Amino acid sequence: MQEKKKIAIIGLGPVGMVLAVYLRNAGHDIALFVRSEDKKEVIKNNGLTLKGFLDKKAEFTYVFDDISEIKNFNPDAVISAVKSHQIALLLEMIKPHISENTLMLCAQNGIDTEFEYSPIFDNHHLLRMVINYAGKLVNNSETEVVFFNAPNYIASLEKENNEISEIIASSLSENNLDTISCSYRDLKKSIWEKTILNSSLSALCALSKLTMLEAMSDPDLVLVIRQTIEESIQVAQKEGIKIDNDFLDHCMVYLTKAGNHFPSLAVDFINNKTTEIDLFNGKIVDYSKSHNLRTPINSAFTSMMRAMTAKAKREQLNQAI
């Protein structure tokens, strides 16, 4: 067995739950941090259960609803599985309670998400994962995993932390959650490829309120999706990301298998929550400007999402007054 590590996990949506169960079953000391005492008690009593595509369960000794307990636990690494728009608040909350040697592993989607942690973690203390599974919460202690497009990828931003990257990858892979520890340069290719896929459908489904299957069943929308991917590939290539020649065709084949449900960004948008649009289509637009490239579809999706989210927030504020 690999060397046992102390790992804190913050954010117990589907991503955090899966990592918690697999790393605990691999023998690591895992501390879970949740938002409420009720959720803490449910997990302490029932553990965490995965069902659907993945079928596993684990019990946990360390479950906290007070973030200050992270100091007493003294983890080797913290895994952040919160939504990207929650990162700033997370950093504010944990800053007083971590040591100068604490490593942060970010497990969010999007381009450059790892640098959202830069206010308190330098590159020597940062790791990044590309998660290729997805699920939906059943309740406070259960997640239904709807797919796993193996493998996941993990890398440290600096080589001196390759050891813990390799330990986490091996721990997950040995329990059949295939994960590859790679260089940060190679990880960036996976980050861009996944973000291009996410950006092709997420905003479209959010704005149209069509599921992925419904969107991919409309020939006119399939053309829009294809053009969105083509724009994004051009930007990635200008950024020095080596996109394979058959990547566009791979994307379209992959998306034809999309399920009759909404991507997570669309779910957040429909529920009037903050979305990750700025790190999806928005990042592609940002990088396109530095290369004088036109990305009209990505730009339209980004602008409409931002405008409609702002309107929803204004309406919520007016109702609260």
Image (cartoon, rainbow, N blue to C red):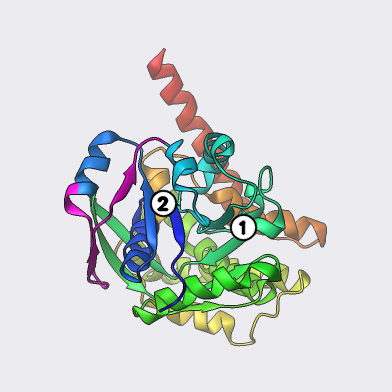
Residue farthest toward the left in the current orientation of the protein: 45
In the displayed structure, would residue 289 be above or below residue 36?
A: below
Q: Secondary structure at mark 2?
A: helix
In the rendered image, residue 18 lying in the magenta stretch gets the answer no
Most foreground residue, 41 or 296: 41
| Disc nearer the start of the sequence (2/1) | 2
Q: Which residue is mark 1?
A: 298
- The answer to whether residue 157 is visible is yes
Image quadrant holding the C terminus, namely top left
In the rendered image, residue 55 lying in the magenta stretch gets the answer yes
Q: Secondary structure at mark 1?
A: helix
Residue 93, position in %: x, y?
52, 35
Q: Which mark is residue 281?
A: none
Residue farthest toward the top in the current orientation of the protein: 321
- At label 2, the amino acid type is Ala
Answer with left or right where residue 70 lies relative to residue 106.
left
What residue lies at 49% left-to-right and 53% top-to-bottom?
Answer: 75
Residue 279, position in %: x, y?
59, 53
Answer with left or right where residue 294 lies relative to residue 218.
right
Q: Which mark is residue 266?
A: 2
What residue lies at 46% left-to-right and 78% top-to-bottom?
Answer: 170
Mark 1: give few (<14), some (14-19) or many (20+) Cα within 10 Å: many
